Each structure stands twice: as C-alpha cells, then as structure tokens.
Image (tube, rainbow, N blue to C red):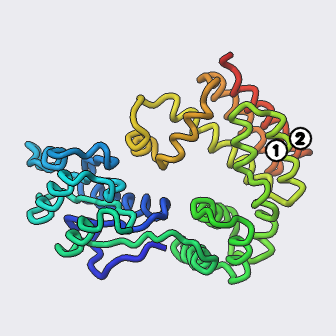
Amino acid sequence: MARKTAHDDPLAPLTVAVGQEDLLLDRAVQEVVAAARASDADTDVRDLTSDQVQPGTLAELTSPSLFAERKVVVVRNAQDLSADTVKDVKAYLGSPAEEITLVLLHAGGAKGKGLLDAARKVGAREVACPKMTKPADRLSFVRSEFRTLGRSATPEACQALVDALGSDLRELASAVSQLVADIEGTIDEAVVARYYTGRAEASSFTVADRAVEGRAAEALEALRWSLATGVAPVLITSALAQGVRAIGKLSSARGGRPADLARELGMPPWKIDRVRQQMRGWTPDGVAAALTAVAEADAGVKGGGDDPEYALEKAVVSVARAARARG
C-alpha cells in the first residue's frame, strides 16, 4: 500500500508520489484530485507527461487566474524532465502559488534525484508507491484493501487470492472489490476458491478481451476453461460488461492524449491504449447490441435461466459478432 509522510494534507502545495507501482501512483493522484474537488467542484486538473512540460509551461499553468480557481497540476515521470524545466520547477517550489497543488510523480531512482531532493527540502508531502515484488507485500496490500472497504477476510482467504491472481495489483484490487460487493459477512478461503480457482490461467478478463476483439473461437475456449477451473459465471458477465462499456465510452469521447482521455473517462491511461486497439470494428449499434446480450446473460447466470453456461456462450458470441460489425 502507499505510505505517506506525517504531513498528509492532500491539498498541500506540493505532493511527490515516489515509486514505480502504477496503481499506487494513480491513487496518489486521485486522492489529491478528489480532495481538491471536494473543496472546489470547479477545480481545473491538468495531467501532463514529462514531455508535455517544457521551459515556461509550469509558469503558464500556475499563473494567477482571473477567477481565482483551484487547480491541480500533475506531472508524470518527473525524473525525465529536461534540465531547463527542472530549473523552472525548483524555482516554483521556492514560492508556490496559492490555490494550486502540484503533484510530481517520480520513479525514485538516481535519475532526476536533484528534483526529488529539492521537493523534500521544501517539505513536500510524500507518498511512497514502491513496486511490490515480494509476495508478503502483495499479501499486506490485499489485507489493506479489505480493511479500507470495511470488510473482514481470513488470512487464508487473503493468501488464496494472492496465490490465484499473482502480482498484478490492479487485478488484486478489482478482485477484493468484487468479493466485497458479492459476498456478505467474512470472506473465507472457500469463497475465494469458488471465485478464483484457475484465474491465473484463464481469467474472466481474458474471456472479455478476446470477445471484444472479435476473436470468438478464442473467447469460447477461454470461457470453457474458466468455467472448468471454477471461475464464477457472474465474474465473466461483469468482465464482459466492463469491456463493452469501455469500448462505448472511448468511441464516443473526443480525441486526445491517453492522459486527457483517462481523466475524462475515469480510466487509467494504460487501459485507454488497450481499448483503442480493441475498438476497431465496433459501431454504436454494435455496442448497444452487445450490452443487451451481456445483460441477458447476467440475468441468466443469476437465476433467470436454466443453463448459465449456454447463456454465457451466447453472450460471448454476440459480443464477438458485434466487434466485427464494421467490416
């Protein structure tokens, strides 16, 4: 989990998120943005990559506003800023603007260390976002996720989840959220086994990815393997729905950089790139038809039909067909 300094006001003039764990870096940004918008719903958020911040860019973004609006300026991969831009940032740190929160995302290595040292020297709020390479760290992360959501899970359940899903923190966090949403009371090892046995080899998201890419045969193969290894059908319909909705949201959005679209659509930038590759062949009518098919399958697996597996197969084929609507 992300670790923070004692000075932990998300609206501090400067936050530095240090590390290489993408999920934790994104959460550090989201925490600041949420706090800013709670204070001022009209907060202007600028989320920039290092190559978008040139000499003079920061001065322009932090100049006084006619309407004195609150602003959050996020700079990703700050360790890659040019020497002249680093000078600008260091100068700004000595006299930060009011109503502006600057968030620097820094990998934490030797590259760009001077900027990180300067941020620490002025008392920046720091959020540690280390890559979780050890199983024990991922186990602690899962426990923390359950605690944050106000739910109890046995130690055996937490370990089983890590064993099933591996090192992807995004998937671990998603799994915890799914279990909390679906299960009442304490979550134990039996529940995790029912939902996630075999997930490392054939996840519900693999089924969804192949379906939205129009690869019906591969999607059906992944579906059958998932069901055979104990993946809960409701997880598959959920993943299908997420995949189709992402296609619909991105296809109707304005063009732009992944960071801009991520902010607009509420998706991480990495997912924007993936969905862009998957959305070729989709039409608005195809999205609508696929969502209808998934909704029917969801009702079928939750007791509205006699054959949940057939309902899932039908939905997978419908989604794959919709993905090829535009020839």
Q: Position of residue 315 (x, y in %)?
A: 78, 36
Q: Is residue 289 visible?
A: yes
Is 261 above or below relative to 172? above
Amino acid carrying label 2: it is: Tyr
Left-right relation of 257 to 43: right
In the drawing, what numbered circle is on residue 264? none
Q: Position of residue 231 (x, y in %)?
A: 80, 58
Q: Residue at x 52, y 40 (%)?
A: 273
Is 326 above or below relative to 321? above
Is 86 above or below relative to 239? below
**Rendering quarter of residue 76:** bottom left
Q: Nearer the viewer, mark 2 or mark 1?
A: 2
Residue nearest the observer in this picture, 167 or 310: 167
Q: Is residue 70 visible?
A: no
Determine crowd level at label 1: few under 14, some 14-19, many 20+ residues with C-alpha closer than 10 A. Answer: many
Q: Which residue is mark 1?
A: 300
Question: Mark 2 and 1 residues: CB-CB less than 8 Å, in contact?
Answer: yes
Left-right relation of 75 to 2: left
Furthest residue toward top: 327
**Rendering quarter of residue 86:** bottom left
Is 113 above or below relative to 313? below
Q: Residue at x 25, y 51 (%)?
A: 82
Q: Earlier in the sequence, mark 2 or mark 1?
A: 1
Q: Which residue is mark 2?
A: 310
